[in-house]
Image: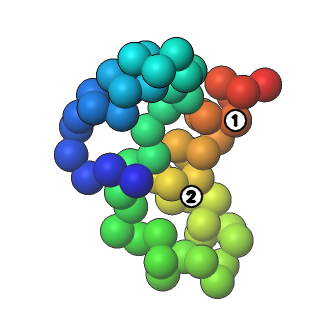
Amino acid sequence: MRITETKLVEEHAKRFGIKYLGPILFDYKLEECLSDPKKLLGTKFARNVKDIVKEIS
């Protein structure tokens, strides 16, 4: 999870020949949504994971 814009992980992945799937941005609302699946699906975290799953499939 990252808070600021950085290419560090992406650069390391490229250096080691690993496909970079995308960032998971820090989400201040994530913790309060953990007990409610509907709220959880509306978080930045869930959107980031969805984008990463698209990269994999």
Query: For the residues marked 1 and 2, what is the alpha-carbon distance in whole angstroms?
Result: 16 Å
Percent of width and height locating residue 29: 41, 71
Which label sits on residue 42? 2
The answer to which of 13 and 1 lies nearer the viewer is: 13
- Position of residue 40 relative to residue 26, above or below, is below
Percent of width and height locating residue 36: 66, 78
Percent of width and height locating residue 52: 61, 35
Percent of width and height locating residue 40: 60, 66
Which residue is farthest front?
16
The quadrant where residue 37 appears: bottom right
> What crowding class fits label 1: few (fewer than 14 Cα within 10 Å), some (14-19), or many (20 or more)?
few
Q: Which residue is at 59% across, 69% downward?
A: 39
Q: Are marks 1 and 2 in contact (CB under 8 Å)?
A: no
Q: Which residue is at 51% across, 54% downward?
A: 45
Question: Which amino acid is tagged 2?
Answer: Gly
- Which badge, 1 or 2, is on the more N-terminal residue? 2
- Position of residue 49 relative to residue 22, above or below, is below
Picture colour scheme = rainbow
The answer to which of 55 and 11 lies nearer the viewer is: 11
Q: Which quarter of the image is occupied by the C terminus? A: top right
Which label sits on residue 53? 1
Report helix, strand or loop for mark 1: helix
> What crowding class fits label 2: few (fewer than 14 Cα within 10 Å), some (14-19), or many (20 or more)?
few
Q: Is residue 30 left or right of residue 11?
A: right
Question: Which amino acid is tagged 1?
Answer: Val
